[in-house]
Image (tube, rainbow, N blue to C red):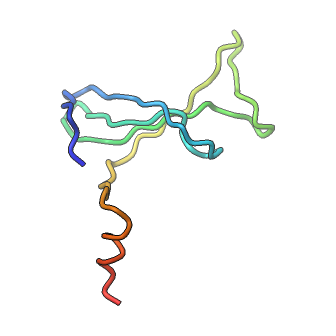
Amino acid sequence: MERKFVLDPGQGSMFKRMSNHPKAPAYSGPLKDLNGKEHDIAIWWAKNDAGEVKKDKNGNPWLQVSLSEQRVRDDRPQQQKEEDVPF
């Protein structure tokens, strides 16, 4: 999938995720590092074992961040993907 916007080195974009899955990030998006290499970034609300959002001593919520190699996305329809199976 080709993006309609271009990131400059050191920039990224975050988009709110609409998933109800408990392990899905709250926000995710692309990020270009200072060398120009593209990555995926994801942000979650940090939670304790009881599932409550962790807070600092001032009551501000914590965020967890994950940076990973950019994934190659396959946006073809499911039927087209199944036709690629050789058996």
Say if 79 sits above or below 45 in the image. Answer: below
User: Hey, which quadrant is residue 56 in on the image?
Assistant: top right
Residue 33 x, y percent position in the rendering: 26, 33
Query: Which residue: 32% across, 48% down?
Result: 70
Residue 80 x, y percent position in the rendering: 30, 70
Question: Which of 83/34 is in front?
Answer: 83
Residue 26 x, y percent position in the rendering: 54, 34
Residue 73 x, y percent position in the rendering: 32, 54
User: Hey, which quadrant is residue 30 in on the image?
Assistant: top left
Query: Which residue: 41% across, 40% down?
Result: 67
Question: Which of 50/13 is in front?
Answer: 13
User: Hey, which quadrant is residue 28 in on the image?
Assistant: top left
Left or right, 42 with reference to 61: left
Left or right, 16 with reference to 10: right
Query: Which residue: 34% across, 62% down?
Result: 77
Quarter holding the C terminus is bottom left
